Image (cartoon, coloured by chain):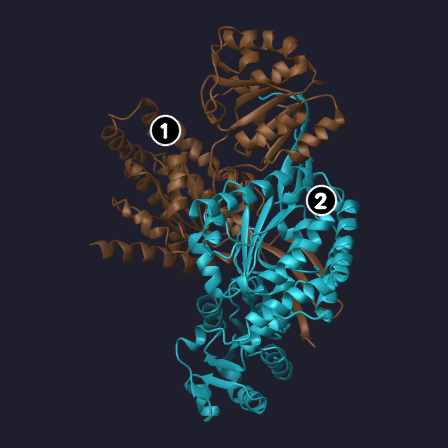
Chain colours: A cyan, B brown
Amino acid sequence: MKKDLKTQVKEIAVGAKNACAPLALLSTAQKNAVLEDMAFALLEKKEEILKANKIDCLAAKKESRAFIDRLSLNKARIEQMSDSLLQISRLSDPVGGVIAAWNTPNGLSIRKVRVPLGVVAIIYESRPNVTADCIGLCFKSGNSVILRGGSQALNSNLAIFNAIQRVMQKHGLPEGSINLVSSADRKAVDHLLKLNDYIDVVIPRGGEELIRKVVKTSTIPVIKHYKGICHVYVDEDADLNMAENICFNAKCQRPGVCNAMESLLVHRDVAARFLPGMLKKFKDAQVEIRGDELTRKIAKWARKATEKDYRTEFSDLILSVKVVESLDEAITRINTYGSHHSDSIVTDNNSAAEQFLKQVDSACVYLNASTRFTDGNQFGMGAEIGISTDKLHARGPMGLEELTTYKYTVYGTGQIRS
Amino acid sequence: MKKDLKTQVKEIAVGAKNACAPLALLSTAQKNAVLEDMAFALLEKKEEILKANKIDCLAAKKESRAFIDRLSLNKARIEQMSDSLLQISRLSDPVGGVIAAWNTPNGLSIRKVRVPLGVVAIIYESRPNVTADCIGLCFKSGNSVILRGGSQALNSNLAIFNAIQRVMQKHGLPEGSINLVSSADRKAVDHLLKLNDYIDVVIPRGGEELIRKVVKTSTIPVIKHYKGICHVYVDEDADLNMAENICFNAKCQRPGVCNAMESLLVHRDVAARFLPGMLKKFKDAQVEIRGDELTRKIAKWARKATEKDYRTEFSDLILSVKVVESLDEAITRINTYGSHHSDSIVTDNNSAAEQFLKQVDSACVYLNASTRFTDGNQFGMGAEIGISTDKLHARGPMGLEELTTYKYTVYGTGQIRS
């Protein structure tokens, strides 16, 4: 049995690899036509998809409300999935884009050209909308894709996948272009993660535990989307009204997401002026404050922050607060306690801003703006496959371009090396 | 003892991480001045370095001649090392370069800016020149570097390292900017490769075995420079004179390097015209031919090629040859048997060229040129740290730009998300 599963998973990976060469020849117009048909197919198969989703939801009824909410589909959500595919069809195609071009003295013409990564594997939790999104993004960027979704969404995923696979067939595209690993056996993922000869990159989408597990098992490069422990630092030269608005927005506008502020740093010279009003505003919004000693002198009701609090992604109405001695201390803290995701400074001082933007080692570093803007759509990239906290290959929001690599194409007229 | 080594290695990594923020503030002029002083220091300490190298060479006298050749330094080689540092000082600085810049509708100004990777670890074999080269490249690109060279070059590496470290001190730069792990204990590398909290990337420079070992052990992302199994495919529409020149150059000009041709593919319709002269020329140059049946009909003296031969990097005057039925077969073979390094097509047919350039999944794909041009200097990038066979982050020759990543700096005027 065990061997069978391994063979089965390998066959999927080989099929995906073999699909790469034909996919590399597709024009943008061809890909867009397929994406439009995919969008249409989801609407057409709405009832089938909802029926399958009902089975999944019934089986999951003992799960948390949040879990069931992520799992559940309805007409509006299917329409959203379909719209996403249409949106992807309208995004510009990164494949074939020339990053740089030059001639060498001996007459070679070198082009650094964007090309698909090859085979992309996505490991995700029980969120059926990810199935359609990932197929769309990978297909548009010329990659074949292997999907492994949470087992509790299997019926929903299969219904979505089958609707889209029929579109691929209709267009005469290789079956291996899109793949769903549907075995209920969890070992399937372990097998998949060892197939570095066929799979070019793995992108786990989900909680930190899932990502760590994938990193530990995989022999394939992994692009990691770890947590967001985002800071706002209110500098001594900050416009304090602006700071209050930014901090409140960064914490409260949507506290459950990765670009929300988890930790507030305030320069000691403005702490006495800034913190009382700010903390009151947070208190009124039911934000639990966990602060250092100075913070708790200002807000006696605040809890004492532990070392762990400063390293925690609360994803909730909880905020750690610390008064710092200097810009340098703020930068060091962010680089040490943060998650290299998104951090902001509020200041009117150009040299402080410059130093912060250069020295804070995060994907997105803000001056006088909320951290909540770290997002593919907000950045104008369109749909994103996630927000990379890695430094290699892709950093920050990952859109279509980040699903490509490059190659050098070199045009000669018989050149040989002397 | 074991714990001590682990602590010692960790302290090096922490020091390197802490050096990143000061390094991020250096101007190009400052870095160039330091590089020039490094170059001068190597000349100044020539005698000390040669003395240290003599100890290493004496201890290695039982090793192969090739090993001792790589290990040995002389005045000319030290001058070369010094020149390399000067050359690096003249290369343009990638740090701070703006890859893209745009404004969002709400008035945020977003810049995608090149920044150092952070801490780069280099694991290499007993080649002392790598010590100076890697320090130069990492320093110019704003990274701190941790070096671990082959133990048999330790005295030479220490002498070079100390000469350069004194320059860093003179310029008031953090000691952690450059580091040499000098413990004789091989476990030091194992400890190092687990420090993903402090080290951003590992680049192993050396044979395949070394690289595989690093990949297996490391929890830090690894950029791999695997072997080069490079192909030339002679198409049915090739200019056969040009093909002969290219193939001979790709095989014989320097057979020991990774961009030399290891496998020749010939379209069956030109095999009878092309191969007799070509193989004779190879025979005269003492190239051993390992061919398929059709090849051996033309050259009865050729050995029979095994499956393994077609997957081998000979790094020697040996060549595998195969006659193929079609362009498609050639492309599939290259993608299956090759190492995704450098492959070339010789043809006058535009559509064949286009298909080959698109479908061959290699870092460098050539039309009508020798594969021997895959090289940082030949490409005009200047010094290189290696040739990546990876697809993520860096592909092909890795120069200064490939030693950087990017971040988004976002300039606001109080924007919050609604």
* Percent of width and height locating residue A334: 48, 69
User: In the figure, residue B198 lies in which quadrant?
Assistant: bottom left
Q: Quadrant of residue A199?
A: top right
Looking at the image, residue A108 lies above or below residue A276: above
What amino acid does circle 2 point to?
Answer: Gly
Chain of the residue under the numbered disc 2 shown in the image = A
Query: Would you name the residue on which mark 2 appears?
Result: A97
Classify the position of the C terminus of chain A by image quarter: top right
For the residues carrying marks 1 and 2, which lies nearer the camera in this image? 2
Q: Is residue B300 left or right of residue A77?
A: left
Q: Which residue lies at the image location 72% right of the left edge and 27% below the top edge?
A: B352
Asked whether A63 or B210 is in front, the reply is A63
The image shows residue B295 at horizontal and vertical percentages of 56, 12
- Residue A230 is situated, as x and y percent measured from the top left of the image, at 54, 71
The chain letter for the residue carrying disc 1 is: B
Q: Nearer the viewer, residue B118 or B52?
A: B118
**Compared to A130, does B272 lie above or below?**
above
* Number of marks in the rendered image: 2
Categorize mark 1 by other alpha carbons within 10 Å: few (<14), some (14-19), many (20+). Answer: some
